[in-house]
Amino acid sequence: YKLLLAGLRLAIIAVAVVMLHELSVTFERTGLPYVVVLVDDSQSMGIRDQYDDPAWQSQAAAVLTSAGLPSEGTRLNLAKSILLAKDARVLRQIEEQYKLRVYFVSAAARAQSGTADEVAEKLGKLEPTGGHSRLGTAVRTVLNDLRGTPPSAIVLFSDGITTDGETLSEVASYAARKRVPLFTVGLGNEQHV
């Protein structure tokens, strides 16, 4: 009985010392953070733009050719050329420093699994066939999918045309509240990469 009382007194003293020193236990994430790449594959990405600036036209043709794509490229091919140029260097560099997540986006965000090489192969075969363009909804879906570990950044390759659902400007504030930067690589006649 006396040992039990002595043990309780020592436990109370230990708790008081811990409380006085305001010790706390924190849990931190130790894995690599995510970087998400979204590629719009809606039908509007199949448009072949004519550029007024000959320098821009020749630069776009050079980038397309270096990625092994036709020099008279569509908006989707421009996005592919950036990601697939120099043996998918951009995807590989992201994969070295982060956990890479790639989604194809049109009517819905469709996650693509695999390594950078496997995703690059799928990206090479991607065609602009989506009937709708729900860009804002796709970004929200990605943020909700990665709710426990928000990505370090989201990079969207698109012409910016939203035909249904939330727009990018509407979902940008949601991403800002989650402290996730949203970068858009604009592909189209009015926009420059």
Image: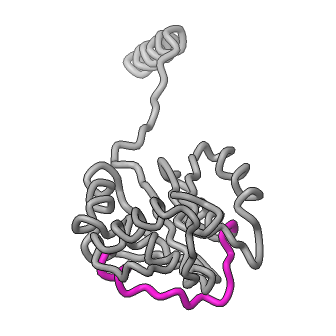
Q: Where is residue 39 drawn, in percent x and y? A: 50, 71
User: Magenta segment, which residues?
Assistant: 120-136
Is 172 on the left or on the right of 22, as rendered?
A: right
Q: Where is residue 57 drawn, in percent x and y? A: 46, 67
Residue at (60%, 88%) from the top-left corner?
130
Of 129 and 2, the residue lying toward us: 129
Is 98 on the left or on the right of 165, as rendered?
A: left
Of 189 and 13, the residue lying toward us: 189
Q: Residue furthest left?
A: 87
Is residue 142 in view from this perspective?
no
Residue at (32%, 62%) from the top-left corner?
91
On screen, residue 144 above or below 80: above
Magenta stretch: includes residue 130: yes
Indicate the quadrant where residue 95 lies: bottom left
Is residue 103 in view from this perspective?
yes
Q: Where is residue 153 drawn, in percent x and y? A: 50, 50
On screen, residue 151 above or below 57: above
Residue at (33%, 55%) from the top-left corner?
94
